[in-house]
Amino acid sequence: MQRYPENIHVNIEDFRRSDWKSAIDSRAREDYPSMWQSLSAAARAAIESGEIAEGKVLWLLADACSMMLNPRSANEPFKPFMVMNGKRSSVPEDFQQSDVTLFAQIAEEIDDIWLQARLADLVWLLKRPRSPQHALLAIDAYRKIPLDAKTWVRGGRECWERALSLTWMLRAGAGERIKEMEVTIISAFEAAKAEDGFLALWLTDLLATNHLGHDYGVDIARKLESLARSFDAEGDLHSAREFFAASAKWFQQTGDDAKATEITVCVAEGWVKEAVARMSSAQPSHMVAASFYENAIQTYRSIPRSKRAIHRIDERIAELHRRLNEAGERSLDEMGIITSPSMDITELIEKAQNAVRDKTTLDALAAFANIYRGARVAQIREFAEKMLREHPLQALVSATHMSRDGRVIAKRPGMGFGDAHSNEYQATLWAEMVRHYGMELSIVVQGDIWPALEILILEHRLRESDFIAIATRSPIVPTGRERLFGKALFAGCEKDFVVALHLLVPQIEHMVRWHLKATGIKTTTLDKDGIENENGLSTLMDLPEATQILGEDVSFELKALFCDAFGPNLRNELAHGLLDDEACQSTYAIYAWWLGLRLVFNTFWNAKRKASAGKGEDEKP
């Protein structure tokens, strides 16, 4: 929709006549979005009344205020407020150079700090060559925005973060502004009271993320502790826990480890109080209480062993384990049954949890690595053939497989009634096998892997160095890749499957290539220019030698999980940057990590037992 004639030119006088002050009356506005709405309404009114130039100025100001501030990005600090059906609201690139010139003039004479900051910031971003004086003007306007709780949640936080970001960019060119802003933030922190809610916490976060406040560390830590104890006395357990946690970090940074430990104990006990409160509430939930007890235990475990004795932490952890077990048992009565058609996985979950419970760390890992026996390709093929026989119509029609962004990434031909060895039949059978495999993985992850992982993490302190050691002694791990495998496996135990997947998938590909090369298999392709390129995992898995080396079952899993477009296609999706954060946390991602753990641990375990047997030792670790 055209809002004003394209050939209309505006200048500073049009701005002065536009009555912009009335549109953004500070008494009636709350933040940039409200300024956007008010300026838009004023712009429409001006255009309708024939004031075209003034209307265009107001539209430009409205567009400038419409954008969302993303202060941590140096290159794209402004994002569109709305994106819908292929359309979006304004972004900086929408402004013409004449608009930027006008913004520069307006910013220098305007007296509204919010609008001045936004326009000066846009001039700094868009004008070429860069205009440092407008960056300084933006900084000075941003830092005049009040540091109170109401303003903070309505855009004040982003404005102050942007001011600090610009100051760090200018470095010496910003003069003493970084120190001045530090003093201002500290003063606002010192004035903050419990009635201000999380304001004091937000301000310390602002200091910490910008590496400020070091000289005030002790005072910050003490005030956070004081506020935490105040919230705790009032029964606001959530706020108390957050402030205690922040206080512990600041005490840790000041080098007061003893005080940091004391406050960490308060954090853990805060979780305990929440568990007790949840069980005694009007609507008690032992399931929720159990999760609180688990958080308390994990918090206690974060305390170094050298600091535990004085607070009797090991005894407290043992007591909380008993409470956790009791709450867990009682929570079974609160659990609903998770079913697919005619399937209840409650017993599956309990069996998985019991398989790893109350074991030594190594035995627990062994149980976890074998919590599922792995895919059996013969059984999957038999089931897929049965489905094709019983439901032939669905296989007669060709199928197209599309990605999340709408691209066609695979096609399956119609099966027809011909030879079972035909290419069409084999393609249809393979697609059905991969589909069934994906359904099976969903049950395995939810019923076996995830419940067992929860118990494993709860009962054991798993360290990165442990997994690196396992990878080092695992025959399947290529030389020089032990740390990468170890880091990937540890990341999964931290439930950071983004890191786990990005580390593990390339290493699995290299592992396959390394073992193929070790048996003399050529893994490269020579192109027409005489350049020898390494083949990707999909090509490697198509080699018959891959199945001979890895076995039919593992070979199938690697192909279906990492290489096939009818499945999750993790290797190719990851290699091309097509996996978003949600996809990296999916059932397939979790299973891929577990499969990597299974391959590495079991080969380590078998080698260990073989070595022990050769020495006449007990096979148990």
Image (cartoon, grey):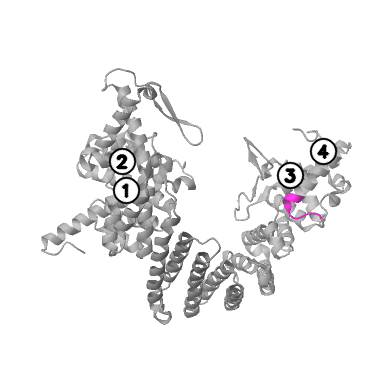
473 left or right, relative to 35: left
| Residue at the image point whose x is 89% and y is 37% from the top | 49
- Report how far apart the C-alphas of labels 4 and 2 lie in the structure: 65 Å
Q: Earlier in the sequence, mark 3 or mark 2?
A: 3
- Where does residue 356 sit, x and y in percent of width and height? 30, 59
In front: label 4 or label 2: 2
Q: Is residue 285 magenta?
A: no
- What numbered label is drawn on residue 595? 1
- The amino acid at mark 4 is His
Find residue 135 and report its image quarter: bottom right
Q: Is residue 66 above or below residue 109?
A: above
| Residue occupied by mark 3 | 63
For the residues labelled 4 and 1, the Cα–Cα distance comes to 64 Å
In terms of sequence position, does the residue under pointer 4 or pointer 3 come before the other? Answer: 4
Q: Name the N-terminal-most of marks 4 and 2.
A: 4
- Mark 2 or mark 1, which is nearer the start of the sequence? 2
Q: Amino acid at mark 3?
A: Asp
* Relative depth, front residue between 266 and 105: 266
Q: Earlier in the sequence, mark 3 or mark 1?
A: 3
User: Element under label 3?
Assistant: helix
**Residue 50 percent across, percent down from the top left:** 89, 36
Does residue 133 appear in the picture of this structure? yes
**C-alpha gap between disc 3 and disc 2:** 52 Å
Residue topped by disc 2 = 557
The answer to whether residue 479 is left or right of residue 163 is left
**Residue 32 belongs to the span the image colors magenta:** yes
What is the number of the mark on residue 9? 4
Asked whether 250 or 175 is in front, the reply is: 250
Q: Which residues are magenta?
A: 28-34
Circle 4 — which element? loop
